[in-house]
């Protein structure tokens, strides 16, 4: 989604909540988040899930948020009148967000496998 009216720094905080999460968990997290931008991010995530299901025939129950990228967009500049005839600049930042969902494999990650093997050996 392009040109969202929020700074990239604030949007990245919400995107960080859903990175590497299962899709259902990510939707639930965004649903109950108190941040204003969470509802727009939820719409983007639901769109990515629908695209994965309908266009790529992926299993919805096995989807995870593979990437949630946030980038800078345009900056709207305004001025604020100050004392003694001076002015100050106000910058209103816009952002982009890109969410990629992928199907989770049945295999465990290598770190989990090594920990499980170490636990069995002990």
Image (tube, rainbow, N blue to C red):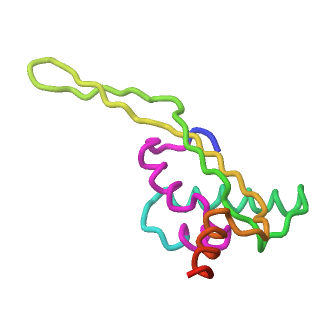
Using the image, determine if residue 98 lies above or below residue 59: above
Using the image, determine if residue 63 lies above or below residue 13: below
Point out residue 97 in the picture as x, y percentages from the top left corner: 60, 45
What are the residue bounds of the magenta stretch?
4-30
Q: Is residue 12 magenta?
A: yes
Specify the quadrant of the image occupied by residue 111: bottom right
Residue 88 appears left or right of 37: left
Front in this rendered view, residue 19 or 84:
19
Point out residue 93 in the picture as x, y percentages from the top left corner: 44, 36
Front in this rendered view, residue 81 or 2:
2
The residue lying at 56 percent from left, 61 percent from top is: 18
Q: Quadrant of the C terminus?
A: bottom right
Point out residue 72 in the picture as x, y percentages from the top left corner: 52, 34
Front in this rendered view, residue 114 or 47:
114
The residue lying at 40 percent from left, 35 percent from top is: 92
Residue 113 appears left or right of 3: right
Residue 40 appears left or right of 81: right
Q: Quadrant of the N terminus?
A: top right
Using the image, determine if residue 100 lies above or below residue 78: below
Predominant secondary structure, magenta span: helix
The residue lying at 74 percent from left, 66 percent from top is: 63
Specify the quadrant of the image occupied by residue 26: bottom right
The residue lying at 51 percent from left, 29 percent from top is: 74
Q: How many marks?
A: 0
Seen as rendered, the residue at the extreme left is 84
Seen as rendered, the residue at the extreme top is 85
Using the image, determine if residue 91 lies above or below residue 114: above
Q: Is residue 97 magenta?
A: no
Point out residue 38 in the picture as x, y percentages from the top left corner: 52, 60
Specify the quadrant of the image occupied by residue 7: top left
Residue 104 appears left or right of 3: right
């Amino acid at each position: 989604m392009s040109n969202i009216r929020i700074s990239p720094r604030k949007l990245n905080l919400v995107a960080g909540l859903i990175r590497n999460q299962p899709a259902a968990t990510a939707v639930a997290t965004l649903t109950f988040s108190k941040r204003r931008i969470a509802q727009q991010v939820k719409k983007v995530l639901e769109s990515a899930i629908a695209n994965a299901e309908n266009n790529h025939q992926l299993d919805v129950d096995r989807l995870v948020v593979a990437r949630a990228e946030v980038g800078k967009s345009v900056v709207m500049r305004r001025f604020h009148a100050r004392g003694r005839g001076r002015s100050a600049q106000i910058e209103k930042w816009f952002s982009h967000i890109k969410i990629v969902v992928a199907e989770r494999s049945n295999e465990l990650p290598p770190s989990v496998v090594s920990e499980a093997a170490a636990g069995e050996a002990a």
